[in-house]
Amino acid sequence: MISRISGGVTAPRGFSAACCAAGIRYQGRTDMAMLFSQAPCAVAGTFTSNRVKAAPVLWDMDIVNAGAPVQAVVVNAGIANAATGKTGLELCHSSALAASDALGIPASSVLLGSTGVIGPNLPLDRLSAGIRTMASALSDSEEAGTLASKAIMTTDTVNKEFAVEFYLPAAGGEGTVPVRLGGMSKGSGMIHPDMCTMLGYLTTDCAISRELLEKALKKTVPDTFNMITVDGDTSTNDTLLLMANGLAGNKPITEEDESFAVFSEAVFSVCRDLAVLMASDGEGATHLVEMRVFNADTKENARTLARSVVGSSLVKAMIFGRDANCGRILCALGYAGPDFDPAVIELYLHGENETLCFYRDGCVQAFDEEKAAAILAEKEVRFSCDMKAGSEEAVAWGCDLTYDYVKINGDYRS
């Protein structure tokens, strides 16, 4: 059984964290974070599919693809180190060398992350000073992990962290041992399904092969981070990393057995919760929006249909205005791409205590407008559509579109 526990990235054994105010761009707040593992980690990662990739994305891709163990992650907020050319890549190398010197580990075992404004160059002197400060302040406390999750925020209004605990067979062959997996992420704008539009870091003390670590992560992303959208923009810096140091003492997972299934479920649980929290914290958002498509003919069609609804600007505006215009949802389903029969589908709006049928037998249904407006006023607004075409389903998450979204992004650089 998988249980939620408090904390985030420092919940697993052997992981510590730190943060500092380096003055990268923000003043009066922390803007750098560091994660460190006592033991070298197997690592898996997924990255943005945007053809314009930030320098730290390219740096991390090289390290992850090489398959060598890693031991540290350094992240800054405020400046993205994207569209910075050769200078940006050189800065990544210099940052890794600074971490190598401060932590006593190879530069090739240091992963990097950046988020913020695209274009400006990062100040190496402030980065290096921040790295030295954090290296001497590393702690495995729950508070250290929480503070690290806050340091990487940009327009986020809340920090995002979760952790779980589960049990696997002990390495010695007798009984079981507790295994933990924690995560933190940031993301509020430039959020759109196409990898994982964000920065996300997962840590675990599970002993597992790199190949299966990668398989667990890659099969999780399509139904978690790839099912969220805020504004339809895929970032240049999207990075999701999963590090496993093996210190839990479980029998190493080397095949797709029951232990692998439990581990994969744990990864899915943390990623799903982080993804939903990111969607609910969309820039300027006042509502989390959920769309469940079920009884679809294929899994991919279910995903496409669900994403189309939560990504529709008109659906988002409808929810902000509390106007139960189900035509907006039908339209988003219709142009999504997958073929379906509009005469047989059924569309529902779900409130905390009531469900309304919007559409059935090819016709918009009569419904209580006041009840619908009351449901649309709830913090979480949920829709579902029965496609009556098969047995596959998918869930997507988004948020409403508000005046504040334009205000936030109209002067983002200032």
Image (tube, rainbow, N blue to C red):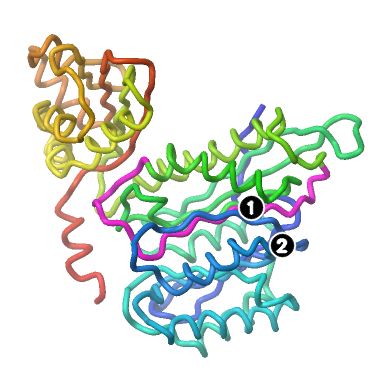
The C terminus: image quadrant: bottom left
In the image, farthest residue toward the top: 361
In the image, farthest residue toward the bottom: 125
Q: Which residues are magenta?
A: 227-249
Q: Amino acid at mark 2?
A: Ser
Q: Amino acid at mark 1?
A: Thr
Numbered badge on residue 37: 2
State the image coordinates of residue 49 (x, y, percent, origin top left): 38, 57
Considering only vertical position in the picture, is 101 above or below 388?
below
- Examine the residues drawn in magenta and state their main secondary structure: loop
Considering only vertical position in the picture, is 90 above or below 198?
below
Tell me if 359 is positioned left or right of 207 in this view.
left
Within 10 angstroms of label 2, few (less than 14), some, or many (20 or more) residues?
A: many
Tell me if 75 is positioned left or right of 401 in this view.
right
Q: Residue at x 33, y 38 (%)?
A: 397
Considering only vertical position in the picture, is 215 above or below 362?
below
Q: In the structure shown, which secondary structural element does the residue marked by tag 2 occupy?
A: strand
Reading the image, the residue beneath label 1 is: 203
Question: How far is mark 2 from mark 1, CA to CA?
Answer: 9 Å
Q: Residue at x 14, y 53 (%)?
A: 403
